[in-house]
Image (spheres, rainbow, N blue to C red):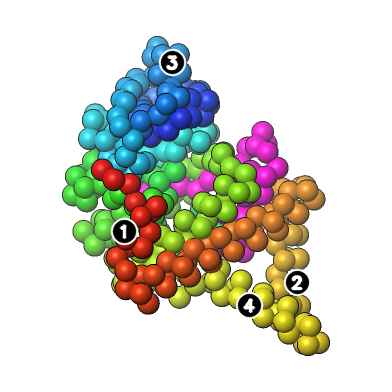
Amino acid sequence: MFFSFIIPVYNRPDEIDELLQSLAILKFNSPFEVVIVEDGSTNTCRHVIEKYNHKLDITYFFKPNSGPGDSRNYGMQHAKGDYFLILDSDCILPESYLEEVTNSLAESYVDCFGGPDKALDSFSDIQKAINFTMTSFLTTGGIRGGSEKLDKFQPRSFNMGLSKVAFEASKGFGNIHPGEDPDLSIRLWNLGYETKLIKKAYVYHKRRIDWVKFKIQVNKFGKARPILNKWHPGYSKLTYWFPTVFCFGFLISLVLFVFKIPFLLLIYAIYFGLLFFVALFKTKSVKIAIYSLIALAYQFYGYGRGFLQSYFNIFILKKEPQIAHPEMFFKK
């Protein structure tokens, strides 16, 4: 099996440098290639690529900006491999990544897999807190942290594997962003392909982010879900409402507390306390544990608000997704 790493990049030469450093020291005996797709950047990474020409089998493409999904498709169309490994440019790989992928596919082959993400010690405290809330079972059910409990796993495109056969059958990613990865997973299932989580094939996801950017990001995640529910109603779940219900419930608990009915607010306090202590145990940092509570607030409010807005526009007002939320779609 010949692997091709597919990496879209947009104005992030420093990130690509870190990622390529980790690719250059992978413990793997077989050859592989790296395909970099510059998505219309004004701050290009061509000079970074040149540093690694003698260390990696690397190919660089520059194309007009059309979004990460279309850029991944472009890279897969031009890659030589029969299995594609798709990464975001803000990822760093552990040395054993390819070995873990190979071992897992040899044991139980699938045409599409996903891996979890972790934080490096060098990440900022905010990055570590966001990583915790995005991967914890207490907040997302662990879908990004390696504790997926569902029958079907939806790989995320920051760390995803896809066979050439499945890519050609599915035509790859659509032009929605974010949301292009669960959309692809569902279409693959409908075509008869299987997906799975490879827990040991994790990446260090740097998440180039601050609080404001994080709120915008999770707000888009929330907007994407009703669109996906409209496209794929058979995969809609009540659990997708959880952040929205959580936020409304918190407001209700505050109102009840004013009227001396503290029970609901006490439940929220227990949940926040549990999250704090789990974060403290995992990160060994009081500061990061406190930041994790802030990240939770941004995550649930941003996602919940985006979900409700998108649901109202699409299912109540009956608007087409591209008309209701054009900011979620790239033009090809």
Residue 18 shows in this picture: yes
Q: Gap in Å between the C-alphas at discs 3 and 1? A: 37 Å
- In magenta segment, residue 135: yes
Residue at 51% over, 51% down: 217
- In magenta segment, residue 118: yes
Local secondary structure at mark 1: helix
Q: Gap in Å between the C-alphas at discs 4 and 3? A: 52 Å
Tell me the residue that label 3 is attached to.
Answer: 47
Q: Nearer the observer, disc 3 or disc 2?
A: 3
Tell me the residue that label 4 is attached to.
Answer: 249
The image shows residue 255 at horizontal and vertical percentages of 72, 82
Tell me the residue that label 2 is attached to.
Answer: 269
Task: Give the magenta-colored segment's residue range.
Answer: 112-141
Tell me the residue that label 1 is attached to.
Answer: 322
Task: Give yes or no for contact between labels 3 and 2 (Cβ–Cβ under 8 Å).
Answer: no
Q: Amino acid at mark 4?
A: Gly
